[in-house]
Image: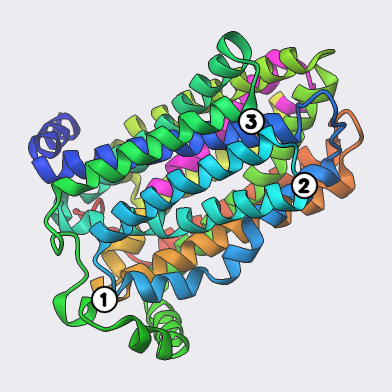
Amino acid sequence: MSVVRDLRVLLRLRNFRRLLAVRLLSQSADGVYQVALAAHVVFSPEKQASAGAIASAMAVLLLPYSLIGPFAGVLLDRWPRRQVFLYGNLLRAGLACCTALLILSTAPDWLFYTSALCVTAVNRFVLAGLSAALPRLVDKDRLVIANSVSPTAGTLAATAGGGLAFVVRIVIADSDAAVVLLGAALYLASALASLGFARDLLGPEADEAGTRLRQALAITTRGLADGLRHLRERREAARALAAMTVIRFCYGALTVMMLMLCRYAWSDTEAHGLALLGLTLGVSAVGFFTAAVLTPWAVRLLGRFGWMSLCAVAAAVLVPALGLSFVVTPTLIAAFVVGLVTQGTKIATDTVTQTEVDDLFRGRVFALYDVLFNVAFVGAAAISALALPPDGRSTVVVAGAAGLYALVAVALYRWSRMRPRAPNAVT
């Protein structure tokens, strides 16, 4: 199979393997850190978190840095990306240690959230930089399979990190601080892994990277406008980002619902709720992995928008069919479907964005992409909080998500028919 052949070629590329190692270590640390935060905010015995409280926590962690995301992109198009990975992960390791100390000292919530907010801020630079650097190491013909392997492997690493955090939290040490320190160690390992790259290998081009920070900050607003204008001229990339934003919105609403179901509807104790949440994340990870396997083949057959449309159709039909029962097993199957659909759409969107956007603008566009991700997720959490009852069982949330999936499917199908699909549609 050509997919297997391309994957073998990719894994022979030393620099691709290095970038993948940086991603895996960094995102596994993210998984550990996020589970520690969830355990502390939602599942701590002394806390009785509501959907509104969960939404507020997500807003505190994500929205402020969604607003500065485009500015991060302008800097990413000027800073050596290797340095972003090195110093960004070192900084996150230190900040995670601060978070652990705050948990141990029972500090006020606002101080705890401020520390977590700083870790999330740096994450915006690292993830956008990983996507922007990938085309520098992989030829255009194998970019789809690279986008299947890298982000999906990163998502699986985050899930594995979350699973490891559950084990540490439930089996080894009943301490959220210990879990956070484990995340700090993984951030440090990711920083060390980035030292294998030459300073300028990952881009951006020398004439942009050489711009001094003060100059970069002075032209941030103009650079943002240029990035938006460039994206407007690349209609396929803009359409893919719009579709992905709506699908991410659905993912956010359903995630908050699952958190409430695990915490209240399906469990009587915090430990049982954590175990159910871990099982849900594991099932969703299987969906991510399935998407990585299916997407390269499906894109070759259907085209990028055709595959994205099929994903949205599947979610529009299966999510309400399985999820409206609010019974554990069918709802877990629905979580698998949502994972497959979200990741399959993301792989295709990443590829469209990377191939349609010029390298000099890629950091800015991926930072905007990141902003759309966060705003959609937090907006969905806020809206679903209004509809969710205390135990999380909400027909309105499930039906609303299904309706949005259906609208996205129709739009994507129309876009896929607007331009004849070329034989090399996978590029």
**Magenta part of the protein: which range?**
323-347
Along the viewing direction, whichever of 277 and 328 lies nearer the viewer: 277
Residue at the (79%, 53%) spot, across then down = 382
Q: Quadrant of the C terminus?
A: bottom left
Could you tell me the amino acid type at mark 3?
Leu
Residue 360 got which mark? 1
Could you tell me the amino acid type at mark 1?
Leu
Magenta stretch contains residue 324: yes
Label 2: which residue? Answer: 109
Along the viewing direction, whichever of 16 and 112 lies nearer the viewer: 112
Task: Return the disc, 2 or 3, that comes first in the chain's sequence.
Answer: 2
Point out the residue furthest to the right here: 389
Label 3: which residue? Answer: 318
Could you tell me the amino acid type at mark 2?
Asp
Secondary structure state at the residue bearing disc 1: helix
Q: Residues within 10 Å of mark 2 (few under 14, many from 20)?
A: few
Residue 320 got which mark? none
Residue 311 placement (x, y as % from top left): 50, 41
Point out the residue furthest to the front here: 105
Residue 195 placement (x, y as % from top left): 19, 48
